[in-house]
Amino acid sequence: MKKLMIFLLLLLLSLLAYGACADEATGNITASVNVSGSFFLIVNSDSFDFASLMPGQTGEMSRTEGITVTGSSAGGDPWYLKVAVVSALSSGSDFIPNENFTWNGTSEGKGSWYGSVDRSFAGGSNTAYISSRDESASGAKVASKFNFRLTVPEDTKPGSYTTTVMFTLTE
Amino acid sequence: MKSPITIFQSPNNIKNSNHKYRFDHCCLVIGICLVIGAWSLVIPAFGLAINIDQPSIRITLKPGETKTGALTVLNIGSTNLKIKAYTEDWKYAPDGSKDFMKAGSSVYSCSNWISLEAQAFDLGPRDTKTVTYKITAPKNASGSHVSVIFFEAVVGTVEGIAVTGRIGSIMYQDTEGYIKKEAQIKSFTVTPSVEGQPVAFDVFLVNKGNSYVSTRPKLTIFKDDKEIMKKDMNPINMLPGDDAEGKVVLNSPMLKEGSYKAQIDISYEDKTLQSKSDFSIKKI
């Protein structure tokens, strides 16, 4: 019993000392953090190809998993993902018209996705995705998968045809 | 203390400590590979990952005035990027997105008023770069002007069809003292419907001023003069002279057979425009 009393007394003294110590140690520390705005675009590949195609043949891209493009904004306004080709597929002076080059795909987002059916690059830049109001407000990440398809016209000359596919993200 | 990965041990491995060590080691290596693999799904080993701190910039200038600002670009990927920075013009597309054009090609362009301190730079993984811009309004400036500052990953040497991306900060410029914001409702219609089918509400606006206008439409539906439904619509944005459509389709069980009144309220700046339309829902 005596030991218990001594223990409790020591415990009480310790708590008082801790309290006093805490009082003495109280002070102000100024902390600051600079949080940057978040508006980002991720594209998971820098190239793809259709391997070899014969004139008249239609081929899918060799990369079967497609190209995944992720967009996000915490700006509060809707954001838009567009896809375009910077020029027609060309090999020297020969080219394949943009209406023969198409894309489609799927999106995980809750906004408007325009790639459920094949769309060609003939009309220039295509809107692929418009974020929903919730996604714009919350800064949610939205991943969309793009597949590309090419139909080689019958009269196409042999060659290695290339171009650049450009994804554009803006509000 | 047991490692979490020991749960993968087979009974044979427990009997032999050397085998156990090898198995643990193997599991550890596999675990690390899985973590790296999972991370690589988020941040591409190839391709690009760019963040900018401001999706849009709103700036007011007096005629002849110059202002400066800055945008911070961050490479959130794991590869080195070569970035080029440049301005372009834009106009609204019918779907509300923006169609981009060569700098200086639009009547409402301020692209050529902007100079960028850095037009090409390298960004290593996790590197940031602050790009300062300077914008000067001409002495005869009036109304609103727009532009976009793009940051584009420069295509390297690749086999096949190159893929790249660009991210833009949209700039809206107003000329202080020379701004007239005026939107008008051209029409507000409700497509007649039957019970259980969607009802479409369409509003067409026109920008009669010389300034960019961003409106926030609200749709309210009344039955017997009592409000039964309210819906915030997507913003309708217009450049001077633009026509724009706002549409909402409702398929609500509250819209049963009967007569209704729809009211659209378009607010922008400190003004509100209003239009009403009667409609009815018929029984199938």
Image (cartoon, grey):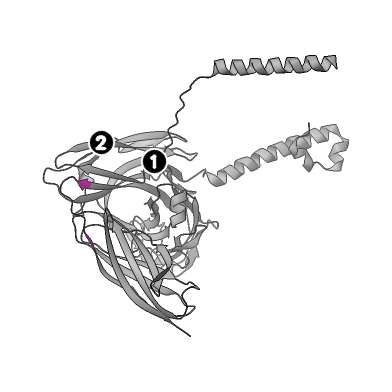
- Picture quadrant where residue B37 is located: top right
Q: What residue do we see at 20% from left, 61% from top?
A: B241
Residue where numbered disc 2 is placed: B68
Subunit ID for the residue under disc 1: B
Residue B50 visible in rendering: yes
Q: Is residue B39 left or right of residue B6?
A: left
- Where disc 1 sits, the SS reads loop
Above or below A49: residue B23: above
Query: Which subunit holds the residue at mark 2?
Result: B
Q: Within 10 Å of the Cα at label 2, are there few (<14), some (14-19), or many (20+) other Cα atoms?
A: few
Q: Is residue B96 magenta?
A: no
Of residue A99 and residue B73, the one placed in the foreground of this image is B73
**Image quadrant occupied by the N terminus of chain B:** top right
- Specify the segment rendered in magenta: B174-183
In this rendering, the answer to whether B120 lies above or below A93 is above
Give the residue displayed 76% in from the left and 18% down from the top.
Answer: A8
Q: Amino acid at mark 2?
A: Thr
